[in-house]
């Protein structure tokens, strides 16, 4: 099915236990309140639920992330089964474990999942390598099958991603342990230096080839901290020197009407650090980029 024919269903994931500043958990509610995700005459966009950590799992961050992840995986899988295009909105990036475990489950009978990870960070730690202890620094490792079983076994114990189908774009802050894991696995990392040297369009085309090759479908996980915090301050863990909203939107626009593009995720919006909805508007612009534009005006 052509993606243009699919409804975009926005699923909020109020994850905050995976990050040092829990205010990212307020991200989905703020983005819904600000109405940044628009319907167009050609694209129906509708909010589904905002999922939260169940009471009984609030005792530790690991329980919270795992329990919310399981809920989210089920919701994402259902949206796909209903023929929709899920847009998951975080919350801290630990929610990615749930999002892509759900997409993996849905695609599993057809083939592997490709994933483009657009982020200032690698998010590829395990508890053995993390320096901060924060689970939002771990979701990509978990999806690749590395880390605590509570994180790697959502929707089954198998790895949800194979290294050859994954790539990262925009990285400019990481620690040795996670870089070593990605290097050992052979995951392609397009760091910010390479993006600046070669241009985002070139890098994005190569990234797209990686996530398409040999996969049954691909997704994009966008950490808003990939963007430059001078332009977009409303994120949990800002790092200077990122992508501009306009260049990322232009690259994403190439995915419009792409039938193999199955789901997207936008995470780490922190309304308390935002200025005048700037970063909230960026989230809206990134969704607009992949939705077919209104014809005429
Ligand atoms: N999704 C994120 N914002 N992750 C930031 C991770 C930062 C750092 N590498 C850590 O592990 O703590
Ligand atoms: Mn991240």
Image (cartoon, rainbow, N blue to C red):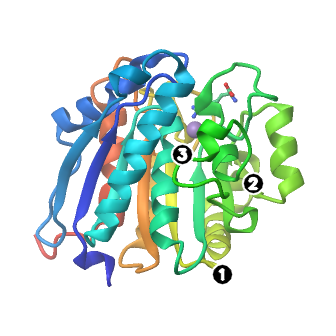
Quadrant into which the N terminus falls: bottom left
Disc 1 from disc 3: Cα separation: 22 Å
**Mark toward the start of the polypeptide (2 vs 3):** 3
Q: How many marks?
A: 3
The crowd level at tag 1 (other Cα within 10 Å; few <14, some 14-19, many 20+) is some
The mark found on residue 75 in the picture is none
Residue under pointer 3: 97
- Pick whichever, 206 or 194, lies toward us: 206
Quadrant into which the C terminus falls: bottom left
Residue under pointer 2: 189
Closest to the camera, between mark 2 and mark 3, is 3
Closest to the camera, between mark 1 and mark 3, is 3
- Pick whichever, 52 or 185, lies toward us: 52
Q: Are marks 2 and 1 in contact (CB under 8 Å)?
A: no
Give the quadrant of residue 53.
Answer: top left
Residue under pointer 1: 214
Q: Residue at x 52, y 41 (%)?
A: 227
The crowd level at tag 3 (other Cα within 10 Å; few <14, some 14-19, many 20+) is many
Query: What is the secondary structure assignment of the residue under circle 3?
Result: helix
Disc 2 from disc 1: Cα separation: 19 Å
Q: Is residue 154 left or right of residue 175?
A: left
Q: Are marks 1 and 3 in contact (CB under 8 Å)?
A: no
**Mark toward the start of the polypeptide (2 vs 1):** 2
């Amino acid at each position: 099915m052509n993606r243009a024919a699919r409804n975009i269903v926005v699923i909020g994931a109020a994850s905050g236990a995976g990050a040092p500043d829990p205010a990212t958990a307020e991200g989905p509610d703020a983005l819904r309140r600000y109405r940044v995700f628009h319907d167009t005459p050609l694209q129906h966009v509708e909010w589904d639920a905002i999922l939260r950590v169940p009471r009984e799992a609030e005792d530790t961050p690991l329980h919270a992330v795992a329990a919310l992840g399981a809920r989210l995986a089920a919701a994402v899988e259902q949206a796909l089964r209903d023929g929709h295009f899920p847009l998951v909105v975080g919350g801290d990036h630990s929610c990615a474990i749930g999002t892509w475990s759900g997409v993996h489950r849905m695609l599993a009978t057809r083939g592997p999942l490709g994933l483009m990870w657009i982020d200032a960070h690698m998010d590829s730690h395990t508890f053995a390598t993390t320096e901060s202890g924060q689970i939002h620094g771990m979701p990509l490792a978990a999806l690749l099958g590395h880390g605590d079983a509570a994180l790697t076994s959502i929707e089954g114990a198998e790895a949800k991603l194979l290294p050859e189908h994954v790539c990262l774009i925009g990285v400019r802050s990481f620690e040795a342990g996670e870089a070593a894991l990605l290097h050992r696995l052979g995951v392609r990392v397009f760091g910010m230096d390479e993006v600046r040297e070669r241009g985002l369009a070139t890098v994005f085309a190569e990234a797209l080839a990686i996530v398409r090759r040999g996969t049954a479908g691909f997704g994009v996980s966008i950490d808003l901290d990939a963007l430059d915090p001078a332009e977009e301050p409303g994120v949990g863990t800002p790092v200077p020197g990122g992508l501009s909203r306009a260049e990322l939107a232009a690259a994403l626009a190439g995915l419009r009407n792409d039938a193999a593009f199955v789901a997207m995720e936008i995470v780490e919006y922190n309304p308390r650090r935002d200025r005048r909805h700037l970063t909230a508007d960026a989230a809206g612009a990134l969704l607009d980029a992949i939705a077919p534009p209104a014809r005429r005006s």
